[in-house]
Image (spheres, grey):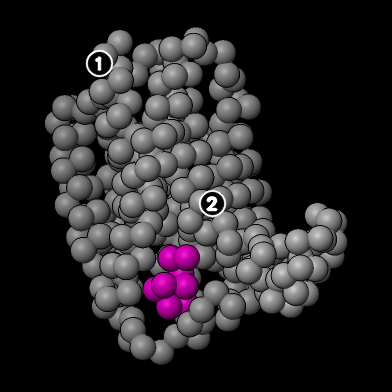
Amino acid sequence: MFIDIIKVIILGIIEGLTEFLPVSSTGHLIIADSFIKLDPKAFSNAFSVIIQLGAILAVVYLYFYDINPIAKGKLAPVVGEETFENMSLKEKFLNRDLETMRLIAKIIVGFLPAAVFGFLLDDFIDAHLFNHITVSIALIFFGIVIIFIEKTNKGDDFKYETLDDITLKTAFTIGFFQCLAMIPGTSRSAATIIGAMILGCSRTSAAKFSFYLAVPTMLGATALKVFKIGLSFSAWQWFLILLGGVISYIVALIVIKKFLGYIRKHDFIPFGCYRIVLGIVVLGLSMANII
């Protein structure tokens, strides 16, 4: 039992560290599974999916004000603090902040492509792409793409400097880039951030939109996996899932804050280099039948 706790802590840290960085959390968990196995396989698969909820909650916690259309700080200055305190929930929604509603609309529109393609292709991807070769190739290829995009990016001439500037059409197109992350090893963050930058978004607006887009996307993916896998686990297994989720939540909180601070002054080239090196190592280990 103690060994299982150690494994869960390590896996939770990996999930929290990699979910919002452009390095692929799924790819890292697939690699980790070769060395840190949870039994049985059905539980291991469910664990890897459900602990993503911890990372999702980290985004919700950090940016709840931004995506809350009836936040006091948004409505009270408009209707008056005393009026706000006396308003019913229905009245608050009737007076909701329109800028926040536009942001929510962009998130929903950006989520739609992944919702459709994820539902249609999930079984095929599980059956044919969840392997070390796919992960290693995706790590290397998109690592090269990240470096190329950064090398050709002027860095000071953005069409969409802030989230407010992003249009619904652009959000929808970013959603198609996100679909590339269905290939294990690609990274949802990498696909959405690089896609957004190609379309003219600044690094900061691209990263923040990627964080927001993660909430419905990861919730949908988790719900789909849980529906297929089922939830017939023991109390001990549920404890391990809860522990993994809490660990991923705490680590993701730290990573998101540090990551946004990093990209205000730096580019993504180090992440691209890391992906290429890791991909080569994984490909070599796989071809040598070590993993």
Residue 234 percent location from the top left of the image: 49, 10
Residue 78 in percent (x, y) is at 74, 77
* Secondary structure, magenta segment, majority class: helix
Q: Nearer the viewer, residue 47 or 280?
A: 47
Q: Is residue 30 visible?
A: no
Which residue is disc 1 drawn over?
Answer: 3
Mark in the foreground, 2 or 1: 2
Looking at the picture, how far across and down is residue 102, in whole percent? 69, 70
| Residue at 20% over, 55% down | 274
User: What is the span of residues highlighted in magenta in the rendered image?
Assistant: 201-208
- Classify residue 149 by image quadrant: bottom left
Q: CA distance from mark 2 to mark 1?
A: 31 Å
Direction from residue 25 to residue 200 in the image, left or right: right
Q: Position of residue 95 (x, y in %)?
A: 81, 69
- Residue beneath label 2, please? 60
- The relative height of residue 236 versus residue 288 in the rendered view (above or below) is above
